[in-house]
Image (tube, rainbow, N blue to C red):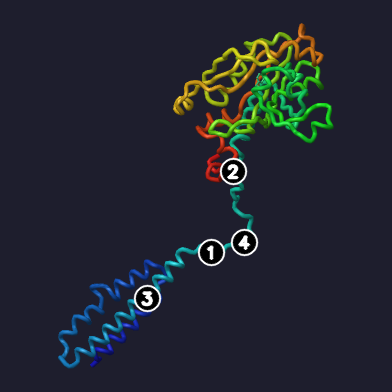
Amino acid sequence: MVSFSEQVESLRKAAEEALKGASDLAALEQARVTWLGGNSQFNALLRQLGTLPKEERPIAGKVVNQAKSALTELLESRKDDLERKAALPKELSDFTLPGRRMRFGSIHPLTQVTNDIIRIFRKLGFVVANGPEIEDEYHCFDALNTPADHPARDSQDTFFIADLTETKAKKQLLRTHTSSVQIRVMEKQEPPVRIIVPGRVYRRDTVDATHNPTFHQIEGLYVDKGVTVGDLKGTVEFVLKELLGNEVKIRFRPHYFSYTEPSYEIDFSTSMLRKMGKEWLEIAGCGMVHPGVFEKMGYDPEIWTGWAFGFGIERIAMMRYGINDIRLFYENDLRFLNQF
Ligand code: DAH
């Protein structure tokens, strides 16, 4: 007759083989139920312990328990192995295959908005012009009807470039607005003119949620025969609706710029702005080009009329994306940039 210990031993071997042979977690669980579960032969043997003669029981009990704990240990280690295997890719990677496209980054929100504005103006026949950021006083102020003693200069506290001012006939400075490029274009080109000028400008401003010493503008200049304020309003409305949606409202407020007459500031209103707690936000200066500017450029103001404007790009971007602090644009914080 087969002894109790021999029965335990043969069961242990069979169970061991089953646990080792399980090729995935489901098969292992199946083996556990069969060999170690409540209805397994192992448990049947444990129950038989009580029927053995008293003197055999301690040894038999020890044998069964040893076998059971050995099998439990094996079960755990097999489980670990199979779990690790399940987490691995099914097939080895071929690292010579062309890779999946990585995320290299995204276009900065200010650049996105600028590109969109350019695209909209292109539909209206405008072309992009550029000018230097280090500008001279003549192009930045004098040619725009703002001589040295003009009070309007005060509002554009300026970064002058000290070293160059001594040797150059014209003082140099970081341009305070993109309006200087109007002059550069008119110097070179006969009318008609239809340009926009995206670019960076500099002012001696304090830094807070809505101000920064450098920001971006987009300038526009349209010169032709019979151009009116009505064209200006229609153009601004079309562009802002394309940019910010049809619900945008605009209003023109009378203002003063030395290079336009009449001059206006443009305010706009959107639901996003109202959500941010404001009804109207100033977004641009504009007006009909002053005849004095045309005369300096050799354009006959009796023949040519035109309008010009300068928009703040940051403000448009803030409104479009619901950004409440201008400094976020310049901090290069990936948590911010990854959202665009
Ligand atoms: N240059 C002005 C500024 O920086 C904005 C501006 C006003 C531009 C009137 C223009 C204009 O072209 O006609 O605030």
**Element under disc 1:** loop
- Tell me which residue sits at (49%, 64%) in the image: 88
The amino acid type, in three-letter code, at marker 3 is: Leu
Which of pointers 4 and 1 indicates the residue nearer the eye?
4
Name the N-terminal-most of marks 1 and 2.
Answer: 1
The numbered disc on residue 19 is 3
Which residue is identified by label 1?
91
Q: Earlier in the sequence, mark 3 or mark 4?
A: 3
Spatial CA distance of label 4 from label 2 is 33 Å
The number of numbered badges drawn on the structure is 4
Between tags 3 and 4, which lies in front?
A: 4
- Residue type, mark 1 in image: Glu
Most extreme residue toward the top, as rendered?
302
Q: Ligand 1 closer than 8 Å to the CB at disc 4?
A: no
Q: Amino acid at mark 4?
A: Phe
- 66 to 189, vertically: above or below: below
Q: Position of residue 212 (x, y in %)?
A: 60, 33
In the drawing, what numbered circle is on residue 332?
2
Question: Residue 314: x and y, percent?
Answer: 59, 31
Tell me how far mark 4 sits from mark 1, CA to CA.
12 Å
